[in-house]
């Protein structure tokens, strides 16, 4: 495995000074637990092979958080897409946030912020120009998280979700 400096972070409990979480790269054996977190926390579900193909193609930005017992409590995954650039005929790479979720009882401790910042650094090796994502217009919590990291709403994608809800398309220049 390659160096993990960018992707690994230990989170300590400020009162006891004990290590509480480890943020690290996802491995194949983690996928079943990642799926459990996804199915508990988000209505958008994906088949196993979808996670596996993301892991095969973009392993350095598929991260998980594990607790003291080694249980996976959060994940983030991205893919890189080629898109035509607005002002030239060239294609540019965009980092597309596929999914992020933190198990409910582990929220508001900074885990999502670290997952995002570590994976956003790691994905730069694909020479991306922009980070992009969609989020439900009702998902105030996630919108706040992205805004805190300087993402801006670029437009609304109507009827983006299967239940008809609209998405905000949010972007951040690299
Ligand atoms: N209310 C308001 N703002 C919030 C809340 C909340 N309940 N939770 C987080 N935020 C904002 C705050 O600005 C917070 O910073 P602060 O704590 O300094 O005020 C900031 O987000 C960062 O919070 P973290 O602790 O890093 O976030 P957390 O680990 O709790 O995870 C997440 C946030 C991922 C949105 C979590 O709530 C979750 O898993 N929700 C369900 C799944 C989901 O909605 N995922 C995103 C879908 S969109 C997509 O995947 C592309
Ligand atoms: Zn998307």
Image (cartoon, helix red, strand yellow):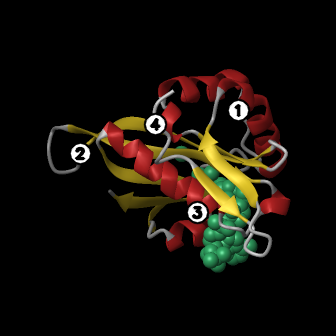
Query: Helix, strand, or loop for circle 3?
Result: helix
Alpha-carbon span between mark 2 and mark 1: 29 Å
Please name whichever residue, 10 or 71, is drawn nearer the observer in this view of the structure. Answer: 10
Instruction: Point out the tag, 2 or 3, that comes first from the N-terminus.
Output: 2
Instruction: Point out the tag, 2 or 1, that comes first from the N-terminus.
Output: 1
Side of 94 where 139 appears, left or right = right
Query: Helix, strand, or loop for circle 4?
Result: loop
- Answer yes or no: do the residues labelled 4 and 1 have beta carbons within 8 Å? no
Estimate the x, y position of residue 172 in percent, counting from the top left. Answer: 39, 61
Ligand 1 position by quadrant? bottom right
Residue of label 2 = 85
Pointer 1: residues within 10 angstroms few (<14), some, or many (20+)?
Answer: few
Q: Nearer the viewer, mark 1 or mark 3?
A: 3
Instruction: Point out the tag, 4 or 1, that comes first from the N-terminus.
Output: 4
**Residue 46 - label:** 1
**Residue 113 - label:** 3
Residue at disc 3, CB closer than 8 Å to ligand 1 = yes
Alpha-carbon span between mark 2 and mark 3: 29 Å
Alpha-carbon span between mark 2 and mark 4: 32 Å
The residue at the point 15 percent across, 39 percent down is 89
Side of 48 where 93 appears, left or right = left
Residue at disc 2, CB closer than 8 Å to ligand 2 = no
Q: Is residue 52 above or below residue 168?
A: above
Residue of label 4 = 3
Q: Is residue 103 above or below residue 28?
A: below
- Answer yes or no: do the residues labelled 2 and 3 have beta carbons within 8 Å? no
Q: Nearer the viewer, mark 4 or mark 1?
A: 4
Q: Nearer the viewer, mark 2 or mark 3?
A: 3
């Amino acid at each position: 495995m390659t160096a993990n400096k960018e992707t690994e972070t230990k989170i300590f409990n400020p009162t006891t000074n004990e290590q509480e979480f480890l943020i690290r790269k996802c491995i194949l054996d983690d996928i079943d637990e990642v799926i459990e977190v996804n199915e508990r926390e988000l209505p958008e579900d994906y088949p196993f092979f979808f996670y596996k193909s993301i892991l095969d193609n973009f392993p350095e930005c598929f991260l998980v958080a594990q607790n003291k017992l080694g249980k996976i409590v959060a994940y983030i995954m991205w893919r890189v897409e080629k898109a035509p650039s607005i002002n030239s005929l060239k294609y540019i790479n965009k980092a597309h946030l596929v999914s992020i979720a933190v198990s409910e009882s582990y929220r508001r401790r900074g885990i999502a912020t670290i997952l995002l910042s570590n994976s956003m650094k790691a994905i730069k090796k694909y020479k991306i120009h922009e980070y992009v994502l969609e989020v439900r217009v009702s998902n105030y919590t996630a919108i706040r998280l992205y805004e805190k990291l300087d993402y801006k709403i670029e437009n609304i994608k109507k009827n983006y979700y299967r239940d008809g809800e609209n998405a905000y398309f949010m972007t951040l220049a690299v």
